[in-house]
């Protein structure tokens, strides 16, 4: 599913109006009806509701919501701000006049200084101050009002986006000047900004409201951002052919593990086999022989010359895919081994965990990474590689730049894991849960992506598919064990079931 930018949504709005005979006010009416229904489903008419409307179209939406609530016996207090220019948008002015046709409306239009009403935890606030049309950060009086509402402990419902938040990029926005919503009712589409961790406390629960924008316009409008859902992955998965053998379905060579961290190698190896690799060879220090042979008897074991760490990697035969990193450590000899391995590799590699940390210790190695490789950093690993970043939004911007520069696919791991392709396309994952924030989860993902690459999927799609299946397996594990009780082994044990569910 495409994630459209504010500009693209505006174009879809325009197409709907111009080609499908839908008036702008009708779209606003659809939106307001859906918001009012949501409010009525949650709160009784006796609940105190205060509606704050700004001078633009978002304010017009809020005023229409107010009218619909009045029609159903609610008595919201409505405050319209017309301060900066004393000139409402055309749509907002129509909606104001429409509201004032009703009797006994509690309505205040603010044109100068203003003291907001007292708010408390028993109150509901509908935030219609500013929508996605905001182009510059909010300041002065509106910023103070937003802080006042956010600190009031009232239940805040934001229309489309929390006031003060832009639909995509918010790096220059003071966080205190963004409305802290408990519920965000987004029109037609989620916004990219909703996928960033730093915005979670501002958007609260998100519910997308269908206002029936043109499906034709949605198909015709291209986007650089996509949300990956089960049906997307279902269309990508290729059924196994009846006469397949372990070589034809893919061979994977994985460098993983060291003394004290062989668990990472075992998890990655078990994951690779569960995800469908036909034949797996694991290169690890000699100390890893027993853990690997006992933990993953299906895998072949190749011993390093060293007892405890990886010091030399000599890939002697052709493999369908290569992976490196889980649990290998960052000893100087291991860094040198990673250096030599990357320079010799002549095919894309899945690079994770300590392999990324080894590259961070020797940054010139970025230039040695084979074109098309997949990097799977969490926030800390990404920052060690590419410098400190204060937000996930900043990391995404940097990942897009780096992926293009080096011809890589970068998997930014997190609650909404984002896969960034070398052409700048970004795929936001929709599966997974907080229980997957557990040791070994990333090692499981490495094995899955490597396995899918071995089976013939291109590195970028192997990453997108692997991330989704990984999250779905985590969701199935959480359903059985709960988020707090979930372990990486539980994810592995559900990989086959997750793939089966997708293919059903």
Image (cartoon, helix red, strand yellow):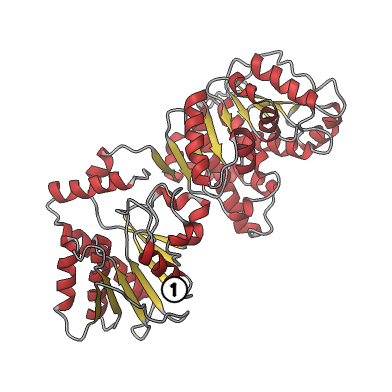
Residue found 64% across the figure and 42% down from its top: 380
Does the image show residue 241? Answer: no
Is 19 rendered above or below residue 423? Answer: below
Please tell me whether mark 1 sits on a helix, a strand or a loop: strand
Q: Which quarter of the figure is the N terminus placed in?
A: top left
Q: Quadrant of residue 97?
A: bottom left
The answer to whether 306 appears left or right of 393 in the picture is: right
Give 391 or 147, whichever is nearer the viewer. 147
Image quadrant where residue 224 sits: top left
Judging depth in this view, the residue of 325 and 59 nearest the camera is: 59
Q: Residue at x 79, y 29 (%)?
A: 331
Q: Quadrant of residue 116?
A: bottom left
Q: Nearer the viewer, residue 450 or 273?
A: 450
Judge left or right: residue 179 versus residue 309.
Answer: left
The answer to whether 251 is drawn above or below residue 43 in the figure is: above
**How many numbered dots are placed on residues in this image?**
1
User: Is residue 41 in view?
Assistant: yes
Left or right of residue 359: residue 115: left
Where in the figure is residue 100, as x and y percent of width and height? Answer: 16, 77
**Residue 60 position in % (x across, y down):** 23, 65
Residue nearer the viewer, 196 or 41: 196
Above or below — where is 497 with respect to 175? above
State the image coordinates of residue 488 (x, y, percent, origin top left): 68, 47
* Residue beneath the point at 74% across and 38% down: 264
Residue holding disc 1: 155
Residue pictured at 55% horizontal, 50% vertical: 415
Q: Position of residue 418 (x, y in %)?
A: 50, 41
Check the image and report above or below for 31 versus 224.
below
Q: Mark 1: give few (<14), some (14-19) or many (20+) Cα within 10 Å.
A: many
């Amino acid at each position: 599913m495409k994630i459209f930018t504010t500009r693209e949504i505006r174009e879809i709005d325009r197409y709907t109006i111009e080609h499908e005979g839908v008036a702008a006010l009708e779209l606003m009416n659809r939106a307001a009806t859906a918001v009012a229904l949501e409010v009525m489903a949650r709160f009784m008419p006796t609940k105190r509701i205060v509606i704050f409307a700004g001078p633009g179209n978002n304010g017009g939406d809020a005023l229409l919501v107010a009218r619909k609530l009045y029609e159903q016996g609610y008595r919201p207090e409505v405050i319209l701000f017309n301060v900066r220019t004393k000139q409402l948008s055309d749509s907002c002015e129509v909606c104001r006049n429409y509201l004032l046709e009703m009797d006994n409306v509690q309505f205040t239009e603010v044109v100068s200084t203003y003291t907001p009403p007292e708010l408390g935890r028993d109150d509901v606030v509908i935030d219609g101050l500013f929508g996605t049309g905001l182009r510059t950060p909010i300041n002065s009086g509106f910023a103070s009002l937003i802080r006042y509402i956010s600190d009031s402990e009232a239940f805040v419902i934001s229309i489309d986006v929390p006031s003060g938040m832009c639909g995509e990029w918010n790096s220059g926005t003071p966080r205190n000047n963004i409305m802290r919503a408990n519920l965000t009712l987004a029109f037609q589409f989620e916004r990219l900004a909703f996928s960033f961790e730093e915005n979670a406390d501002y958007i609260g629960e998100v519910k997308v409201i269908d206002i029936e924008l043109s499906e034709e316009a949605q198909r015709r409008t291209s986007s650089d951002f996509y949300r990956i859902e089960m049906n997307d992955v279902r269309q990508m998965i290729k059924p196994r052919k009846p006469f397949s053998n372990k070589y034809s379905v893919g061979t994977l060579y994985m460098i993983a593990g060291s003394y004290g961290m062989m668990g990472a190698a075992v998890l990655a190896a078990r994951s690779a086999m569960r995800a469908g690799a036909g034949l797996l060879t694991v290169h690890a220090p000699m100390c890893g022989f027993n853990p690997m042979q006992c933990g993953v008897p299906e895998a072949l074991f190749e011993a390093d010359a060293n007892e405890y760490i990886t010091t030399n990697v000599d890939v002697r035969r052709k493999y369908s895919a290569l992976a490196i990193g889980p649990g290998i450590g960052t000893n100087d000899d291991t860094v040198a081994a990673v250096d030599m391995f990357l320079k010799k590799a002549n095919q894309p590699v899945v690079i994770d965990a300590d392999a990324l940390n080894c590259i961070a210790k020797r940054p010139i190695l970025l230039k040695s990474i084979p074109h098309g490789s997949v990097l799977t950093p969490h926030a800390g690993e990404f920052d060690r590689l590419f410098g400190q970043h204060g937000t996930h939004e900043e990391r995404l911007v940097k990942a897009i730049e780096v992926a293009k520069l080096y011809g890589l696919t970068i998997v930014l791991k997190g609650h909404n894991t984002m896969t960034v392709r070398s052409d700048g396309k970004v795929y936001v994952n929709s599966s997974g849960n907080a229980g997957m924030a557990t040791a070994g989860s990333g090692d499981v993902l490495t094995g899955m992506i490597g396995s899918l690459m071995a089976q013939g999927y291109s590195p970028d799609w192997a990453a997108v598919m692997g991330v989704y299946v990984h999250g779905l397996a985590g969701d199935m594990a959480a359903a059985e064990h709960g988020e707090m009780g979930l372990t990486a082994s539980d994810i592995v044990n559900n990989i086959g079931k997750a793939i089966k569910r997708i293919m059903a």
